[in-house]
Image (cartoon, rainbow, N blue to C red):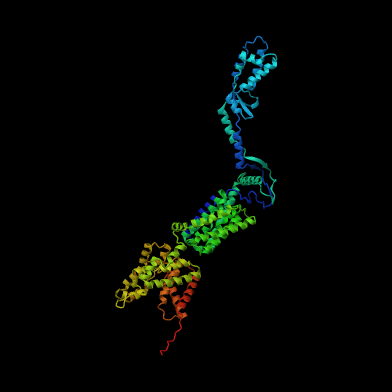
Amino acid sequence: MNIPFRLKVFLPLIFLFAVLLAFTPRTAKWNYEYRKGSVWQYETCRARLDFPILKTEAQKAEEALRNSSVRTPYFKLSESVGVESLSGASGLDCQSYPGFVPAVISSLRAIYSKGVVDDAGLAALEGQEIAYIQKGKRAQKVPSTELFSLASARSALLARVSESFPDMMADSLLRSSGAYSLIVPNLVYDEQLTSLVNSQADNSVSETAGFVKAGDVIISKGDIVTEELAQVLDSYKAEYEHSVLSGGKDWQLWLANILICLAVLVCFYFAIHFSNPLVFKDYNRYLYILTMFALMAALQMACIRFWPRWLLLVPFPVFALYLKAFFRTRVIYPVYIVSLLPLLLFSSSGPALFLMYVASGTVTLYVFNYFSRGVKQFLLAIVTFVISALVHLACSFTGLVILNFPNDLIFLFIAALLQIATYPFIYLLERIFNLVSNSRLDELAENSNELLRDLEKKAPGTFQHSLQVSALAQSIARAIGADESLLKVGALYHDIGKMTNPLCFVENESLITTDEARYHSELTPLQSAQDIIKHVTDGMELAHDHHLPTVVSDFILTHHGTNCVSYFYDKFIREGGDPEQKSEFCYPGRKPHTKEQVILMICDTIEAASRTLRDYSPEAISNLVERLVQDKIDDGQLEEADITVKELTTAKQVIKGYIAQIHHERIKYPSRRKK
């Protein structure tokens, strides 16, 4: 493995590490799951630190409403009003009663010391227990009952004067002397200041409703989680999570997250390495599987941080189907399980959710083989929902998760429907990553495909040859663990170029009428070779015109590699041709790289050559297979291929058995005697 290849593998992993770290929850994991009305199934919970009991939003709203209904009025004191009133009282003309004026002045002084409010101020005081009187820059708090209105001030003046002169007609004298008119409001209601101060008071709602000390018992095992206890537990959770990020502990959390993300990435890397290391060499598929892992992890951790309840709404099993479209089960299953690790590590109900999605994803992968098309996908969604619901219910019975009935089941049902809605994105992903899904391969392998129908019609011999090569290649694929679906399609399309000139090829000579000459009878060896070689370029043009995926058209380009058309080259040499012209007899293809391309090259050559055998004994078949495979090796056709000696040996054994079964001896039936 060279350095550039290592960089191509590990650079995306570094980016994936950054994504994981960015979405990792910034708080410690809260290990308790509870709701109001449920039984506390954990051990007795004691506070590990001091924390305030936070008010709920409803409590804060109620307090704010209460504050808004209490509107304390503010008044400004006008001292000049009292001075003018007292000055006017000293000038009253009441000589018949020498003590009358001093009594009025004394009474007015007592009244103005409390304060007289006008009609607007009187309305503001209605229903209020206190008021504020602002004198200069200071405001004094006074009971609202001590303040006088104009009417109550006059009554107070009358009462004081009557007390001093019980035999006097005090009311008549006060009216005639004009003493009543001296009483004017000295407190002016300040509406602007009242609104400003009270609006600030409305916003100043206390956030806490009590305090719990470290070591205090919060709730005991078996207790019912009442509304009050739930409020205390919520407050403890908030303080616990906050305390991890404060007091110099934030670096510890970052270090822990870095190590956890590295551990998850290591598990992911080796899940691929042990299941199918060839994924690293197919860069598009490698980037695809990284993207699926990143999306799953990011969704899990985003939900855990911001919307924990949404974890039941995300159709995680659909990611298993996204992987199934391009990978075999031995790769899908470990990668899918590792992709769910963030859920297990960071969610408070992680074990239950992890088990639920592993179970539903596993069943979905299996059932998808039977319910993958049309309306059957709704049956698949029902199966996914049933499995998820059963596991979730079972976990709730054991206390692993708190069941919020029926909301949880509704969420799981919606997630199952979203699985159907999001699966068609596979076709977009197929285009983005330039991959070919298994469903696309199945479509290409159908007999109704236009290109295959044309091949069967125009070159029936080639079509039969392709079917035989396809069956043989699939047998080898099953034996050595190659991609069977891809090989099947590659074998069906590898010779489509022959339909442009079918009579050039011996398997199609049945199309020649008896009075027609054979195609190569009047051609030179070089012309014959050129016409045969052309089926590769013709095939690539047809593949381009019919938009065949690159992974399929590669079989057209590599099934002959850079081999020479040996029959006509040898004839050319025998007729005195120049050996330096050998390149003109060689295919303009490419040597095979993948094991699937190697298998097709070998099967194509041996299937055609096996038709020339006259002796189908095991020895003759074995000699033919060994010789032709060794010729490919000696010619350097397999030098760039990713196939082991063991796999090549297994392939040869499968081919020998396959040819022997096709060409086994049959019983000769005796003819009936004619009577």
One can see residue 580 in this view: no
Give how far across and how far down residue 651 sits, in percent: 48, 72
Q: Quadrant of the C terminus?
A: bottom left
- The answer to whether 178 is drawn above or below residue 404 in the figure is above
Give how far across and how far down residue 40 sits, in percent: 67, 51
Give how far across and how far down residue 225 sits, in percent: 66, 48
Residue sitting farthest toward the top: 95
- The answer to whether 124 is drawn above or below residue 321 in the figure is above
In depth, the one of 272 and 308 nearer the eye is: 308
In depth, the one of 659 and 653 nearer the eye is: 659
Residue 455 found in image quarter: bottom left
Q: Is residue 234 left or right of residue 583?
A: right
Residue 535 found in image quarter: bottom left
Residue 452 found in image quarter: bottom left
One can see residue 211 in this view: yes
- The answer to whether 61 is drawn above or below residue 121 in the figure is below
Q: Is residue 484 left or right of residue 80?
A: left
In depth, the one of 384 and 502 nearer the eye is: 384
Give how far across and how far down residue 144 sits, in percent: 64, 27
- Total numbered circles: 0
